[in-house]
Image: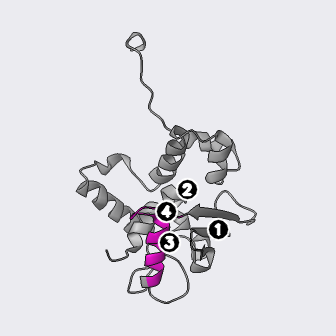
Amino acid sequence: MRPNCFRGCLVWPILAFFKIGELVVNKSLAHSHTSSLDNFSFSENNVSINLKFSKTDQLGKGSLTIKPSINSHVCPVHLLKKYFIARPKSIGLVFIHFGGNYVTRYQFNAVLKKALNVANITSDNFQSHSFRIGAASQSSKMGFSDDEIQDFGRWESKAYKRYIRIPTLKLASEI
């Protein structure tokens, strides 16, 4: 399987609660908030991600996230390592095309829509923000505490609660 920058773009927002703007370029904004190569550091069993700035970190304190490898052929850490090895040898932003151009939010959304269509999933209800919603919701379903979810997503306020969306069953008497 040839390493592909879009695999990383589609996996990492869920695994590390990334905002899409932290991974790909938004045409209207400077690149200073998009992750660069020097934000990532690999060891044998994990990857450390040092975000120097994010929307929730207005003071620029930064945040360090460490994600472990998993014993699977679809391990996000291993996929990212393979991409880094195959990636063009230029410095700068993490996700670039093999021609050297940055991956944009528009391109990310187009690939997301195509991937959903291939999987026969209607793309009407999915956008780039769906990844953070999915990460928070899945973490809640898995039993992580509110404090842990808030920490995972780097939320400074209780805004993370709006991201947790777990459908509940209604009793027949409630309908």
- Give the Cα distance between marks 2 and 3: 17 Å
Using the image, determine if residue 167 lies above or below residue 126: above
Q: Quadrant of the N terminus?
A: bottom left
Using the image, determine if residue 125 lies above or below residue 169: below
Q: Residues within 10 Å of mark 1 (few under 14, many from 20)?
A: many
Point out the tag, 4 or 2, that comes first from the N-terminus.
4
- What segment is highlighted magenta in the picture? 69-85
Residue, disc 4:
12
Q: Position of residue 41 (x, y in %)?
A: 61, 75
Place residue 33 in its image quadrant. Answer: bottom right
- What is the secondary structure assignment of the residue under circle 1? strand
Kindly identify the amino acid type of the residue bearing the numbered disc 4. Trp
- Give the Cα distance between marks 1 and 2: 12 Å
Point out the tag, 2 or 3, that comes first from the N-terminus.
2
Point out the tag, 1 or 2, that comes first from the N-terminus.
2
- Give the Cα distance between marks 4 and 1: 13 Å
Q: Residues within 10 Å of mark 2 (few under 14, many from 20)?
A: many
Kindly identify the amino acid type of the residue bearing the numbered disc 1. Leu
Q: Are marks 1 and 2 in contact (CB under 8 Å)?
A: no
Q: Position of residue 139 (x, y in %)?
A: 54, 44
Checking the image for residue 25, the label placed there is 3
Residue 31 visible to the viewer: yes
Kindly identify the amino acid type of the residue bearing the numbered disc 2. Phe
Q: Are marks 2 and 3 in contact (CB under 8 Å)?
A: no
